[in-house]
Amino acid sequence: MIKWTTSDVGVHPAQPKESLEENPDPIGRVNWMEHLPNSSATNKAWREFIGGFIAERHLGYTDTDETAYWMNGFPKGYALYRHHKTMPEGKPDRDDVYLYGSDVGRFRSPGEFLLHALWLMEGAQRNQCKCKNCTVPPERRRRSGAA
């Protein structure tokens, strides 16, 4: 199990804007965020994926194909959520997972978070992160999906 060395989350972690409770409207449509605790299968899968990357790239372990490395959770102030959303008729409903906490925006996959995770483990020096959320200018983040 690998422990986080730092976090980039300040006093007020970035959190989802959607409701955190299931909220069907009168005809059954929903738009809410479900918190995924460390015990959930999705949370475990994210932490294993990130842990393997950190073990190899940051710690220099060469046995990541044979040995599973896990993160002990997410950095302080981060939380994983599943977005449940009913789409307009004719389109399939959405069920997406996001990692929230950082002020640079949510992360849409463990792969998208990898470079940010590495940056955190290496000391989080300001303006040195190479992840998509940190390198896309703020005015372009919404259009590109980085925020």
Image (tube, grey):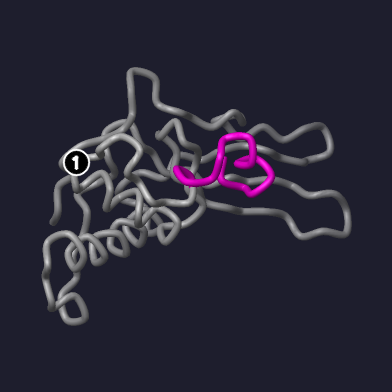
| 104 in relation to 38, above or below | above
- In depth, the one of 94 and 144 nearer the eye is 144
| 28 in relation to 26, above or below | below
Tell me where residue 87 appears, x and y as whole percent: 78, 49
> Which residue is pictured at 56% across the width and 46% down the height?
146
> Which residue is pictured at 78% across the width and 41% down the height?
28
Report whether 116 appears left or right of 64. Answer: right
> Which residue is pictured at 72% across the width and 55% down the height?
93
Dominant secondary structure of the residues highlighted in magenta in the image: helix
Extreme residue toward the top, this view: 11
Tell me where residue 67 appears, x and y as whole percent: 15, 75
| 74 in relation to 113, above or below | above
The stretch of residues the image draws in magenta is 133-147
Tell me where residue 56 appears, x and y as whole percent: 19, 68
Residue named by callout 1: 123
Q: Is residue 74 magenta?
A: no
Amino acid beneath label 1: Gly
| 24 in relation to 50, above or below | above
> Which residue is pictured at 17% across the width and 81% down the height?
66
